[in-house]
Image (spheres, grey):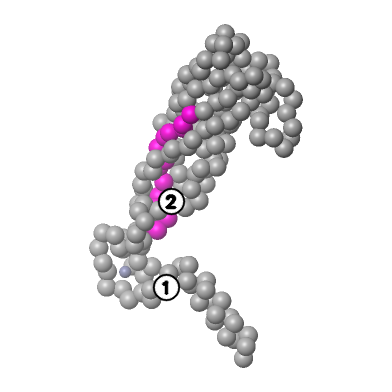
Amino acid sequence: MMKILLHELEKAKGQALPLEGFVDVKSVRLDGTETLTDVRFSGECHKEADLVIVTGTITGIIQAKCAKCLTPTEYSLNVLFDEKFSEAPVDEESDIHFFHSGMIDLSPYLVEAIVLELPYVYVCKEDCLGLCPTCGTNRNEKQCECKNERIDPRLADLALFFEKNKSDNK
Ligand SMILES: [Zn+2]
Ligand SMILES: [Zn+2]
């Protein structure tokens, strides 16, 4: 648990205090295909009037299968963190987080920041060729003899759309 104690910040008299440590990512909701490891936060916090300002970077390793070729691949997690906290009641609309009892537990905010940054789809490389839909060969590694109609999946929807329009107009 990564905590900030208000009385320690007050003792620092406006000076920034370093914040460093592992982030507990057990509560990060993953879609089952990815794993997060070695997730750390490195940053600082300081007090500005009534506000506690926390800035830093979350880094870590994501392991996930490429959506196209299914090869397990490592991606780096790199999330900028910049949040404000206040012990005074805050407006619901405001982006300032409320805390009480002189203590901020950063963990849920770090987890939220990570979740927002996780990609929807993992692709091992931009030009990944994926698997052959006929024989399953990883086309990044070798070419097979199959004759697949080369339709970009993004264009396939469009093709369907035009197909439908054509029949509607008959
Ligand atoms: Zn791939
Ligand atoms: Zn093939």
Relative image position of residue 87 (x, y in whole percent) = 69, 21
Q: How many marks?
A: 2
Q: Main secondary structure of the magenta part?
A: strand
Q: Nearer the viewer, residue 2 or 25?
A: 2
Residue 58 within the magenta-colored segment of the rendering: yes
Q: Is residue 154 above or below residue 119?
A: below
Q: Farthest bottom residue?
A: 170
Residue 60 within the magenta-colored segment of the rendering: yes
Mark 2 surroundings: few (<14), some (14-19) or many (≥20) residues within 10 A: many
Location of the N terminus (image quadrant): top right
Disc 1, SS: loop
Residue marked by disc 1: 151
Q: Nearer the viewer, residue 61 or 82?
A: 82
What residue lies at 65% left-to-right and 15% top-to-bottom? 102
What residue lies at 52% left-to-right and 46% top-to-bottom? 31
Location of the C terminus (image quadrant): bottom right
Q: Is residue 50 above or below residue 141?
A: above
Q: Nearer the viewer, residue 44 or 137?
A: 44
Q: Which residues are magenta?
A: 56-69
Disc 2, SS: loop
Residue marked by disc 2: 122
Relative image position of residue 25 (x, y in whole percent) = 51, 32
Q: Farthest left residue?
A: 142
Relative image position of residue 72 (x, y in whole percent) = 36, 48
Whether residue 61 sits left or right of residue 88 in the image: it is left
